[in-house]
Amino acid sequence: MIDLSGRVALVTGASRGIGRAIALKLAARGATVVAAARADNAASTVSAITAAGGRAEAASVDVTDAASSEAFVAGALERHGRIDVLVNNAGIAQDQLLLRMKRGEWDAVIATNLTSAFTLTQAVLKPMIRERRGRVICISSVVGQAGHAGQANYAASKAGIIGFAKAVAQEVASRNVTVNVVAPGLIETDMTRLITENAREEWAAKIPLRRLGTPEDVASAVCFLASDEAAYITGQVLAVNGGMYM
């Protein structure tokens, strides 16, 4: 079993869905998790972790605000003395056909999904390089690999994450810091639960494994990349999509 005991892991967007599952699984593997979300939205995730005997704390962060993000990292470093894992998971979607997309819809998605990864990754690299070890894991999407109509802003942000991670991976590899990407496909979340049963069946039929993924499927991939078992893996995209895109 993957053992992350003694590691400190920062997870953004940890209040629900994929982010919550990642935080829970990292904690179950022994990591101390700093679960970040707006306001006190990560409190329930932390309660679930501590109820299961894990170690976690909640952090209120606006990832679109550089000062808030930098304070989040600085506070975690001050309290724990180290940062071993950063999971850039926070993300939003504001879907619209490009001809109708407002500049604000573009800017909001890029700021949340892509620029936040720049700010947070930059903030954690100094302590990771000093320790000569670290794991940065960015959550992209199958949409960033294949595109999808009505999601030009989202696709651009998630494709940008992939290019960003590959570039940074080359910059910090000599310091034993790895940077990788997990690209989920269609995952069972609050959003996908809103679609009709017929639509779900149609989507599942297009997936070779014939089912939607779960947040836990994504969390397992993140835990692997955070572990010593993935020490020789960097600059890679691990697709968790049931074969939806190959």
Image (cartoon, helix red, strand yellow):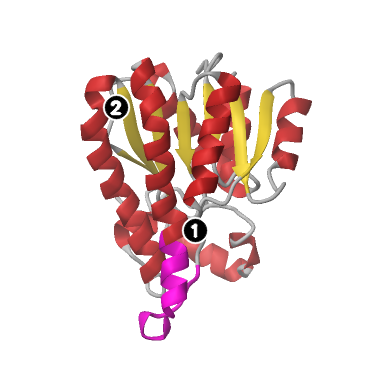
Q: Secondary structure at mark 2?
A: loop
Q: Earlier in the sequence, mark 1 or mark 2?
A: 1
Three-letter amino acid code of the residue under disc 2: Ile
- C-alpha distance separating marks 1 and 2: 30 Å
From the viewer's perspective, tell me whether residue 1 is left or right of residue 126.
Answer: right
Q: Residue at x 56, y 45 (%)?
A: 18
Mark 1 lies on residue: 204
Residue 221, percent across and down? 45, 34
- Judging depth in this view, the residue of 4 and 127 nearest the camera is 127
Q: Position of residue 62 (x, y in %)?
A: 57, 51
Q: Is residue 30 above or below residue 87?
A: above
Q: Is residue 13 at all visible to an observer of this figure?
A: yes
Q: Find the residue positioned furthest to the bottom.
A: 99
For residue 81, above or below residue 59: above
User: Magenta stretch: dominant SS?
Assistant: helix
Q: Considering only vertical position in the picture, is 10 above or below 81? A: below
Amino acid carrying label 1: it is Ala
Range drawn in magenta: 94-110
Q: Secondary structure at mark 1?
A: helix
Task: Find disc 2 in the rendering and name its residue.
Answer: 233
Neighbour tally class for label 2: few under 14, some 14-19, many 20 plus, Cα within 10 Å: some
Q: Is residue 235 left or right of residue 136?
A: left
Residue 38 appears left or right of 152: right
Q: How many marks?
A: 2
Say whether marks 1 and 2 touch (CB < 8 Å). Answer: no
**Image spot of residue 49 (x, y percent):** 71, 29
Residue 146 is drawn in which quadrant? bottom left
Q: Residue at point 51% right, 53% down?
A: 65
